């Protein structure tokens, strides 16, 4: 009887040991699983952070591109147009874009303006009418304020005296008569006549434009460039 109880006790101890070993193994497994789960979460968090940084970088790049694309300029259009005023245009616009916004009047002398000229920010585009243009050419005496295109697009006020001589002794090739043009070195009656014929169709926007007249090349231009003006 005593031996039987001792045998049972031994069996119970073995079962208890097995239970304890099984529980310990389970605890170790759970602990490892928790650690692995933490590592997985940490990896996911890092991955998410990288993805967020990538998204932020893409957003910043997109914002910079959008800022570049959104650059605009302001242009003031006056004169012979139906809707004079200040217009907002995309950067890189041309004179023709500003005039199209303001709608040129039927009497506008668009041939006096370089419509292809690029527009900087804050300029004024002045469109002369036929009447204003003729008045600027035929002022008989004294001086008058004339608004005229300068460098193809911007309007500015200046003093224009009677005749073609400016106050500084320069010959205004837009208004000088036959005799005054002939005072220029190398300009005879024939070339003076060509200059007058040319400006009746196309106004000189700069002294260099006189080279467009047949018979006036670089050499002749070098002789007269310091003696002529378009003011």
Image (cartoon, rainbow, N blue to C red):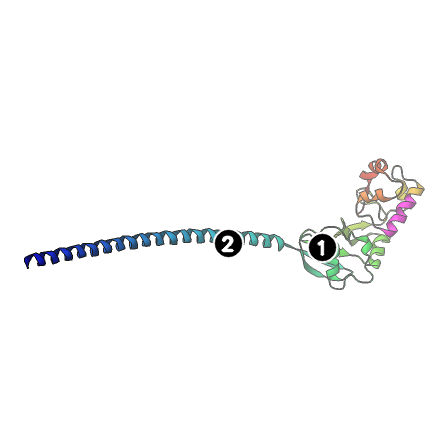
Q: In which quarter of the view is residue 95 placed?
A: bottom right
Packing grade of label 1 (10 A; few <14, some 14-19, many >=20) is many
Q: Is residue 201 magenta?
A: yes
Residue 55: image tag: 2
Determine whether, in the image, residue 35 is placed left or right of residue 125: left
Pick the residue in front: 29 or 130. 29
- Most prominent secondary structure in the magenta stretch? helix
Q: Which residue is drawn at 94% across and 42% down?
A: 190
60 relative to 183, above or below? below
| Tag 1 residue | 124
Determine whether, in the image, residue 6 is placed left or right of residue 119: left
Q: Residue at x 81, y 39 (%)?
A: 225
Image marks 2 and 1: residues in contact by CB distance under 8 Å? no
Q: Magenta stretch: give its range.
A: 192-203
Percent of width and height locating residue 3: 7, 56
| Viewer can see residue 178 | no
Q: In which quarter of the view is residue 97 placed?
A: bottom right
Q: Helix, strand or loop at disc 2?
A: helix
């Amino acid at each position: 009887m005593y031996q039987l109880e001792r045998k049972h006790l031994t069996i119970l101890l073995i079962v208890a040991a097995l239970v304890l070993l099984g529980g310990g193994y389970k605890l170790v497994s759970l602990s490892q699983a928790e650690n692995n789960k933490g590592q997985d979460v940490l990896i996911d968090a890092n991955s998410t952070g990288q993805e967020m940084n990538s998204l932020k970088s893409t957003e910043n790049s997109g914002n910079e591109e959008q800022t570049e694309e959104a650059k605009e300029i302001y242009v003031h259009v006056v004169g012979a147009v139906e809707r004079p005023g200040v217009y907002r245009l995309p950067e890189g616009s041309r004179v023709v874009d500003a005039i199209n916004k303001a709608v040129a009047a039927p009497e506008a002398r668009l041939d006096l303006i370089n419509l292809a000229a690029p527009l900087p920010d804050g300029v004024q585009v002045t469109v002369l009418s036929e009447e204003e243009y003729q008045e600027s050419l035929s002022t008989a005496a004294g001086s008058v304020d004339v608004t005229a295109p300068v460098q193809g697009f911007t309007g500015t006020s200046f003093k224009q005296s009677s005749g073609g001589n400016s106050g500084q002794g320069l010959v205004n090739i837009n208004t000088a008569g036959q005799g005054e043009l002939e005072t220029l070195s190398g300009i005879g009656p024939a070339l003076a006549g060509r200059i007058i014929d040319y400006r009746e169709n196309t106004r000189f926007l700069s002294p260099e434009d006189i080279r467009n007249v047949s018979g006036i090349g670089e050499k002749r231009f070098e002789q007269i460039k310091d003696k002529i003006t378009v003011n």
